[in-house]
Image (tube, rainbow, N blue to C red):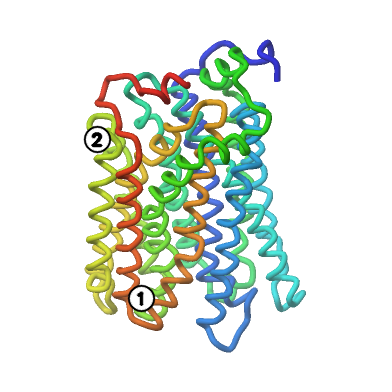
Amino acid sequence: MHSRNVQPVADNPRRVLTASLVGTTIEFFDFYIYATAAVLVFPHLFFPASDPTSAILQSFATFSIAFFARPIGAALFGHFGDRIGRKATLVAALMTMGVSTVLIGLLPTYETIGVAAPLLLALCRLGQGLGLGGEWGGAVLLATENAPPGRRTWYGMFPQLGAPIGFLLSAALFLLLTETMTDESFFAWGWRLPFLLSAILVIVGLYVRLRISETPAFRRAIEKQERVAVPVMVVLREQKLNVLIGTVAALATFVLFYLMTVFSLSWGTTALGYTRVEFLIYQMIGVLFFGLTIPVAAWLSDRFGRRLVLGLVTATIGLFGLVLSSLFQPGDPASALLFCILGLALMGMTYGPLGAALADPFPTAVRYTGASLAFNLAGIFGASLAPYIATWLASSYGLSHVGYYLTGSAVLTLIALACIHEDRPAGRPEGAAARAA
């Protein structure tokens, strides 16, 4: 792309933040309806087995495929995001995720086509992972590269808000279907509706994103001829340490979230005896706190520094792991609700500053690729197998060991945060990263 083709006029902040938020909301809605279906639907329709635990574990295995695809998506979309531009790449990522999700809603089940059904499901899940691998980094850069001095974390939290909003939409839709349909109708065709309805959201997202301009930072990179031929090679050669630190710094965030959503929904509605409706309501209340704490953490981070805020929250996550089993008990709705609220509030506190924290160390020419790789590699190590590992630990050794698993991940993240560069006090320039932008 030549510089004369890049729009020189900066976007209205409201338009930029809306575009960053709406895309991640759609992406996470798509991702979460799969996660919910992986617990409630797919073990019955795509992985029939005499042992329910075995069917759930097979379903979780396909759930993990997307996390292994995400770094590939990060490298692929990151290449074009750093070479062609943030805008066009974000549109392509959204289309990839949206098409894959709609196709899941059209798949025949195991009863109809046998073993081809789970294979096709896995293929669509791969497409979801590729799309989300390219989505997150671009959405964060769209926000942070348009941010005024001292407000990078605040702007960077808008795409992060897409996570709780997308979760609320998906959980509310599954809850509505559960309440208004018989189990026979739900498993016959009702479960398909969330996947098919995502097409409407994708059209809305495309409309918003096609109306934005390229980011000022990327326009300057074009003008200064800073773009590199193969961004991923530059990242792997010159930014390995930043990728490693960023990956481990996001580890506890991923483990916490997928324990609080996928694993807890599965374990709560099977081993602990809560109904599907009960636990979805608990999770939805918890996600409200997830959404509310994201802007709180972003404001605190711009004021006091991201590393300090992330360090304190991560230490608290470690402590939460030690009491997890005492809160998550059968026959105690108040304790289960408190478990969801505390865990997801901590998720918001760590997730709010994370986007800016991971993007900040990378220069503009490779920032899309570098930040996306760090975030999505953390997804492999922190999230892809978290439901599977937690289910195995809880079944084999008891729920307390799931808490130890979370605490261990928090310790590793604290070590990484100690290695990350210190944030600037509020109102001061964003340092080397800002100069690179």
Under tag 2, what secondary structure? helix
Local packing at callout 2 (Cα closer than 10 Å; few below 14, some 14-19, many 20+) is: some
The answer to whether one can see residue 98 in this image is: yes
Q: Amino acid at mark 1?
A: Tyr
Q: Which residue is nearer to you in this view: 418 or 177?
A: 418
Q: Percent from the top left, x then y, of residue 226?
A: 59, 20
- What label sits on residue 300 in the rendered view? 2
Q: Residue at x 64, y 39 (%)?
A: 77
The answer to whether one can see residue 292 in this image is: no
Local packing at callout 1 (Cα closer than 10 Å; few below 14, some 14-19, many 20+) is: many
Please say if 266 is above or below 253.
Answer: below
Separation (CA) of disc 1 from disc 2? 36 Å
Name which quarter of the figure residue 221 lies in.
top right
Please say if 46 is above or below 408.
Answer: below
Q: Amino acid at mark 2?
A: Leu
Q: Which residue is mark 1?
A: 274
Mark toward the viewer: 1 or 2: 2
Name which quarter of the figure residue 325 lies in.
bottom left
Q: Earlier in the sequence, mark 1 or mark 2?
A: 1
Q: Percent from the top left, x then y, of residue 169?
A: 46, 51
Q: Percent from the top left, x then y, of residue 308?
A: 24, 40
Q: Residue at x 37, y 78 (%)?
A: 394
Q: Percent from the top left, x then y, of residue 266?
A: 44, 72
Q: Which residue is nearer to you in this view: 270 or 64?
A: 64
Q: Residue at x 39, y 64 (%)?
A: 259
Under tag 1, what secondary structure? loop
Q: Quadrant of the N terminus?
A: top right
Q: Residue at x 37, y 68 (%)?
A: 279
Horizontal side of 330 relative to 220 (left or right) equals: left
